[in-house]
Image: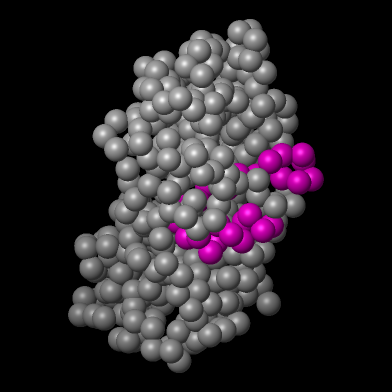
Amino acid sequence: MSEAQGVAEGFRQALDGLARRRVDTPAVVVLLDVVRRNIETMQDFATAHGLDLRPHAKTHKCPEIGRLQLAAGAVGLTVGTLGEAEVFAAAGCDDLFLAYPVWPAGTKPERIRRLAGSVRLRVGVDNPEAVELLGRAMGDTPERLEVVVEVDCGAGRSGARPEDAGAIALAARRQGLRPVGVYTYPGQGSRSLDAPPRAAQEQRVALTAAARSLESVGIAPEVVSGGSTPTTALSAHDPITEVRPGEYVFGDLGNLRLGACTAQQLALFVAATVVSDRVPGQVILDAGTKVLGREGDPEKGFGRAVLPGVSPLDGPALFRLNEYHGYLGIPPGQPRPPLGTVLPVVANHVCPVVNEVDELVVTTSDGSEPVTWAVAARGHLG
């Protein structure tokens, strides 16, 4: 059996199990056996290369999956918001890194102080103004909060210049906070097929300069953190001590195109039903932007249906989405799936898909009894 046939067969068996339990569509379906294998593979890589693995939980937002990652050997979890941190702390994770340039306003000062009193909490900063506010937020226990300076390695998003990292860390120390290192996000590694190697090299240069900047002011960096899913395999070198991939746990078409996952590592799809066939050359699925998100374009599509014997990258593409309608193009000469057919659809980017639903339908590629897991951190944006 080819890889494409194996993937399609696993999806089909999962759908058969959902049909027996009369699961409504659209549904976001997770193959637990594939998730476990993905977690083990990434953990084995990190362990073999002497790296700490701190997976980014913003991909799954699900405490059950976070627990699987921790049980496999992850040192802690990465989160994107203070609300996500609170959810995972309540679920039992006691080592969290909020990898975002926190601005402690509104209710955040009290929440940060409370959370830092119950778990090991690291937060990202990229400016001295936020450092001063964090010092105030922590009151008479600033040493409870660890600070990691974010630097930009070419993604053009948040992050200080690498050479300014030492000054920001020193400002944190003067506030009584505990500066522990530097981090970056090589997001430019997702932009094209040849982008990951360049992004990994830019990450290395930036983190090396940032670590030296800390050392120049007398602060030894305990953590030098990098790596996205497309660049993690290229991040096993000095000065990096920690990687924070997220999407590896599920995979998606974007990572498949980049070679950052294989088709056999696709662990999440949207089960969608053919609800209309009135227009030649297409059918309408009950999966639009409300479940698939908006990432894609008419050329590469907004997701692809997985059919027997066809690579997921070559399956029929959703060429347009409305809120509740997915327009699935059917190439000339190919039969259209009949009304009522349930198809597995793999998204370009998995993170927005998870964030659109309240629960994941969890089964296996041999069609085991499905259960539901809450997307507990969904909507916790602040």
Residue nearest the viewer, comparing 61 with 196: 61
177 versus 279 height, above or below: above
- Residue 103 lies, in percent from the top left, at 35, 29
Q: Nearest the camera: 328 or 218?
A: 218
Where's the N terminus, which quadrant?
Answer: bottom right
363 in relation to 94, above or below: below
Q: Which residues are magenta?
A: 46-72
Q: How is the image coloured?
A: one colour
Q: Nearer the viewer, residue 132 or 195?
A: 132
Residue depicted at 71% across the width and 39% down the height? 51
Residue 355 seen in render: yes
Q: Quadrant of residue 80?
A: top left
Which residue is found at the position 72% from the left and 27% from the top?
A: 238
* Residue drawn 61% across the image and 8% down it: 217
- The image quarter in which residue 242 lies: top right
Q: Which quadrant is home to the C terminus?
A: top left
Towards the viewer: 321 or 175: 175
Q: Specify whether residue 57 is painted magenta.
A: yes
Establish if 327 lies above or below 343: above
Task: Name the spot of residue 357 as percent of width and height, x first.
Answer: 34, 64
Q: Position of residue 351 (x, y in %)?
A: 42, 53
Left or right of residue 120, residue 293 in this image: left
Q: Is residue 217 magenta?
A: no
